[in-house]
Image (tube, helix red, strand yellow):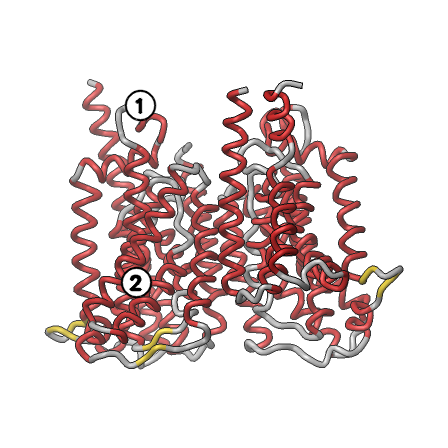
Amino acid sequence: MSTAAAQMARRRVLSGELAGFMYRVAGVVLVCVGLSLATDAFLTVSNLLNVLRQASLIFLVASGVTLVVLTAGLDLSVGANVGLSACLAAAAIKSGAVELGIVTGLASGTGIGLLNGLMVTRLRVPPFIATYGMLWVVHGITYWYMDGQTIYDFPERFRALGSGYLLGVPIPVYLMTACLAAGGVFTRYTIWGHQIYAIGANPEAARLSGVPVRMRLNLVYTLSGAMAGLASIVYLARLNSAEADIGEPLMLPAIAAILIGGTSLFGGIGSLSGTLVGAILLTLVLNGMNLLTVGANWQPLVTGVIVLLAVWIDVATRRRAGG
Amino acid sequence: MTPKSLLARATAVPGVAYLLVALIVAFSILGPGFASAPNLRNIGVQSSILLLLALPMTFIIMSEGLDLSMGAVLGLAGVTLASLLAGGVALAPAAVAASGVGLVFGVINGLLVVRLGIPPFVSTLGTLGVAQGAALVATDGQSVVGIGPTLPSLYASAWMGLPFSVLVAVAVYLIFHAVLYKTRFGTYVFAIGGNRESLTLAGVHTDLYHIGIYALGGLMAGVAALLLTGRMNAGHPTAALGMEFDAIAAVIVGGTSFERGNGWLPGTLLGVLTVGVLRNGLNVVAVSSSLQVASIGALVIVALVIDSVRTSWRERT
């Protein structure tokens, strides 16, 4: 009896989640139709591939943060993290080998993420304060390290990571697909993934049922940092130059993509595939603005409004569901 | 007097006081020019804008909230002020308009947080984007210059040797102190963070006061735009981005807590001075401004560690 009820409840939740996902896909289609009508430049293969490439970059940054948001936390430091990791990687490539640069970027990103995790779990600093403080610490170190310089012009085989193609598809799209697949399996089919959802839904209940909450929190913040490190490599390879402010425009879009994708800020609800759809939807809007020659100065305004709308929908849905 | 009570007394002094004294001593030794009268005056001037932001930020953090949009709103208000002045509008109406811009954003923040129930750090992150974007669009990313002599000369004026900005900061501090400790609104500020539910059950229009706290934050960002624009002799859309971080750091270093509705306004004053002394002292010993930002982050962590150590000491005794 109770299992039947639980099954029904589970099916209802699943169908609700599926409906939300389909609404978002419909949103993507609508924006696409609108943009194709508005401008001829939109519906071309090269532009659509460009959108996908841009969306995969936002997804790489946002996917790690999605795990953090699933635990009802937040990582505001990812933009700054991408900045420092990209600059360190650039310097390492210049001083030696491409491989050294990649390792440096990944290590720097992961290290910053681990520090975030330790602040949250050991010093018990609220996540948004810990990662917000980290944002400015990393920002300061980056500007000090770069000292107004630009590092540019990397070897061709490194640049391929960001701007190359394989079978006609941009290489970042492959990276995105791989991360989505690995992350999807991790969150849906492993115990650790389920524990992450459990922590977000109810940390006290998770702790009492034996979830090592601190270790899992450390893990998600470290993963968030590692993904920022990976994104920094791809971003650097694509731009072919590094300046201190390289990562700054990424934080707001990453958070917007997560919220559009239906991951709840209150934890426990959401998915990486949702974040991907969110990243694509956001990129389409920004790409459309670009094609319709709306200036880049409008981007923070539009992204800010999108964040507010998305989180408002999240809050309103929860309230209606009696959450 | 037993050693135990001596320890208890030492731990009763807030950590920020130790930090401030330690920093002053350290910089006086390291930097020869640090303890000079002109430099101390300089610290006062530099801290005044920060104080204007940190005071309402204390209220906001006491209410278990946060305002990440203050720097961006300050920038937008400054651009508004500078544009109006450059267009020949008199100082008084221009200043009212700038404060109005701040107030509107503050009220929007309050409505998003209180009426819609959006977590404060996300709602103010959204309004950060909106305010920054609006300032960039309005100015096309350029500085607004040619604001005329009225505001800069007012900023440069002094009374009994005290610079204008310091006078403003002192006046605003006294007002905030009186509001927090002598008025009903102040009592409600404590109660909203401490026990919002029972305040509402007692028949208080909690939402109204809660929105008022955020409105105050926006308003003060608008007022701070007056000082910043006077100091820079121009309005720049991105000049104040990140200033909210200094304000949040000052409040946390000053001992106001995110969790229990515990706030201490003199602590915020000490916190602002600590951040000001740190920035100025690092300047005197020629540390670059970008590393200053990083060290303020480190300062926050040190303050948090000191407070957690003090708490565990107190629990032991």
Q: Nearer the viewer, residue B205 or B23?
A: B23
Kindly check if marks 1 and 2 are in contact, taking CB atoms under 8 A apart as contact. no
Query: Looking at the figure, which quarter contains the C terminus of chain B?
Result: top right
The image quarter containing residue A91 is: bottom left
- Mark 2 nearby-residue class (10 Å; few <14, some 14–19, many ≥20): many
| Relative to B171, residue A296 above or below | below
Across and down, in percent, residue A130 comes to: 45, 46
Q: Residue at x 53, y 49 (%)?
A: B299
Q: Look at label 1 and name its amino acid.
A: Leu
Q: Which mark is residue A208?
A: 1
In three-dimensional space, the C-alpha distance between marks 1 and 2, rounded to whole angstroms, equals 39 Å
Q: Which mark is residue A280?
A: 2
Q: Is residue A23 visible?
A: no
**Secondary structure under the numbered disc 2 in the rendered image:** helix
Q: Look at label 2 and name its amino acid.
A: Ile
Q: Is residue B108 left or right of residue A165?
A: right
| Relative to A67, residue B306 above or below | above
Q: Residue at x 77, y 57 (%)?
A: B166
